């Protein structure tokens, strides 16, 4: 890889120390901010990735990240019990005015801690299984098993919520009801279904563009619609039946489906370790249903899985990095061949949207930039199998990018420039766990 002279190239251990310091700087006493200012709370799937980084140098702190996250899980009394096991995408442990929408925007004032009212890709069981596998000494494994005995029952409630509330008919494909819930907020895949969503008429003040250049963030038209959806969720009383019936945005997101599929397999394996045979069997039945149903999301044009509008049934035929998670999820049609093609098109790893597709924007959030944690998940899907060399290729590209750019939120796939927030926790954690060999 060509490295311009103006960039410092960090040695491996020097960069690892910077990564550890990034997590320490973003630690707020049991939970990790993604980065200060721009994201001043605990985010759901960020927490799972951050814990991997903590594990490499402070295992008790790594396990604490999950316990703190699950303090925000809704219980049997919340929203009439219909959302028992729901885990929000933001947990507001402390107040901050540097982010919109903050804790006063979601209608969850009765909760302690307050949370948002949408979720995020449920990767936690996979992260916990990786943490267990990385805990090789007898003492580390004993510590891991002690925490898993507490965390696995909570994860079972969370997976049950996904299947009960987002796929009540048992189709095998859960439904997403908000772009933020996908974690891939402004992906081109959501452009068509978002057109059916009205723009909010109420005033609001964004904070993100105070921290990051507006060219790297979603435009106002996007925010107007996602704020409408946020308010709709509250007006529906967080009732999952009403939301699935009336929400103007309902999508079968291949990213959530893939991550849930892998996590359910890993959660079943953890249940086996804890002699929880009935939950393990239930999870494997859900996995089998998804394995069959996901074939309806195959794009012949792009030779990968894509998302689908759950209202119209039309494929959202955009090639995004979420569709490259097929091997990670264990779907029958893997993603190795298509991933190889993607890698020939950019110099700096796998972008969030394929560069030769409509909607690609190299520097705007999830419409093109490279996200290191997604590259890690995709690569992990190839490790140890016939495409193990492909995993190594993704890994090496990522390592070289971070050695020259450090820990940004995301990266331009054409120039390698670091974009978005700096001093970013999950990028640092990805380096420690996956690239540095911690």
Image (cartoon, rainbow, N blue to C red):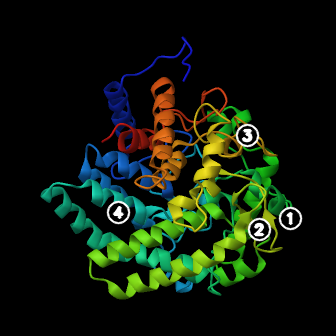
Q: Nearer the viewer, mark 4 or mark 2?
A: 4
Q: Nearer the viewer, mark 1 or mark 4?
A: 4
Relative to 167, is 355 on the left or the right?
right
Cα gap from disc 3 to disc 4, whole angstroms: 33 Å
Query: Of 371 and 212, which appears nearest the observer?
Result: 371
Cα gap from disc 1 to disc 4, whole angstroms: 40 Å
Which residue sits at x=67%, y=65%? Answer: 253
Q: Secondary structure at mark 3?
A: loop
Circle 4 is placed at which residue position?
129
Residue 329 position in % (x across, y down): 52, 64
Q: Which mark is residue 355?
A: 3
Residue 174 position in % (x across, y down): 63, 74
Q: Nearer the viewer, mark 2 or mark 3?
A: 3
Circle 1 is placed at which residue position?
196
| Circle 1 Cα neighbour tier, 10 Å, few/some/many (<14 / 14–19 / ≥20) | few
Cα gap from disc 2 to disc 3, whole angstroms: 26 Å
Report if the CB atoms under discs 2 and 1 are less than 8 Å apart: yes
In primary-sequence order, the first of circles 4 and 2 is 4
Q: Secondary structure at mark 2?
A: loop
Q: Please indicate, yes or no, whether residue 112 appears anywhere in the rendered image.
A: no
Cα gap from disc 3 to disc 1, whole angstroms: 26 Å
Circle 2 is placed at which residue position?
249
Q: Secondary structure at mark 4?
A: helix
The answer to which image quadrant residue 209 occupies is top right
Q: Report the label total.
A: 4
In primary-sequence order, the first of circles 1 and 4 is 4
Report if the CB atoms under discs 3 and 4 are less than 8 Å apart: no
């Amino acid at each position: 890889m060509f490295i311009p002279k103006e960039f410092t190239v960090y040695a491996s251990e020097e960069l690892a120390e910077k990564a550890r310091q990034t997590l320490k700087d973003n630690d707020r006493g049991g939970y990790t901010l993604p980065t200060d200012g721009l994201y001043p709370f605990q985010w759901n799937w960020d927490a799972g990735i951050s814990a991997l980084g903590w594990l490499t140098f402070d295992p008790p702190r790594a396990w604490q990240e999950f316990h703190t996250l699950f303090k925000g899980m809704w219980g049997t009394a919340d929203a009439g019990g219909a959302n028992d096991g729901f885990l929000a995408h933001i947990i507001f442990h402390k107040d901050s005015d540097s982010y919109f929408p903050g804790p006063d925007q979601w209608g969850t004032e009765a909760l302690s801690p307050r949370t948002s009212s949408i979720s995020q890709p449920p990767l936690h069981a996979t992260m916990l299984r990786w943490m267990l596998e990385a805990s090789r000494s007898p003492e580390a494994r004993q510590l891991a098993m002690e925490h898993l005995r507490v965390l696995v029952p909570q994860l079972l409630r969370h997976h049950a919520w996904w299947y009960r509330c987002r796929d009540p008919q048992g189709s095998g494909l859960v439904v997403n009801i908000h772009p933020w819930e996908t974690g891939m907020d402004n992906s081109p895949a959501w452009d068509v279904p978002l057109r059916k969503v009205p723009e909010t008429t109420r005033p609001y003040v964004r904070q993100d563009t105070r921290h990051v250049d507006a060219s790297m963030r979603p435009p106002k038209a996007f925010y107007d619609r996602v704020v409408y959806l946020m308010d709709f969720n509250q007006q529906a009383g967080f009732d999952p039946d009403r939301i699935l019936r009336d929400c103007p945005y309902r999508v079968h997101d291949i990213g959530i489906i893939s991550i849930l599929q892998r996590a359910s397999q890993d959660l079943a394996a953890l249940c086996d370790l804890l002699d929880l045979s009935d939950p393990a069997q239930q999870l494997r039945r859900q996995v089998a249903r998804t394995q069959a149903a996901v074939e309806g999301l195959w794009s012949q044009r792009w030779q990968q899985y894509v998302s689908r509008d759950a209202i119209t049934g039309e494929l959202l035929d955009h090639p995004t990095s979420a569709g490259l998670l097929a091997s990670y999820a264990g779907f029958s049609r893997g993603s190795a061949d298509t991933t190889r093609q993607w890698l020939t098109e950019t110099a700096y790893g796998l972008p969030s949207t394929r560069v030769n597709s409509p909607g690609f924007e190299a520097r705007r959030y999830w419409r093109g930039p490279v996200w290191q944690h997604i590259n890690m998940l995709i690569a992990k899907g190839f490790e140890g199998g016939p495409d193990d060399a492909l995993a190594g290729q993704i890994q090496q590209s990522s390592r070289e990018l971070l050695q020259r750019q450090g820990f940004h939120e995301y990266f331009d796939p054409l120039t390698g420039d670091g974009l978005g927030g700096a001093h970013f926790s999950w990028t640092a954690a990805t380096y420690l766990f996956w690239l540095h060999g911690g």
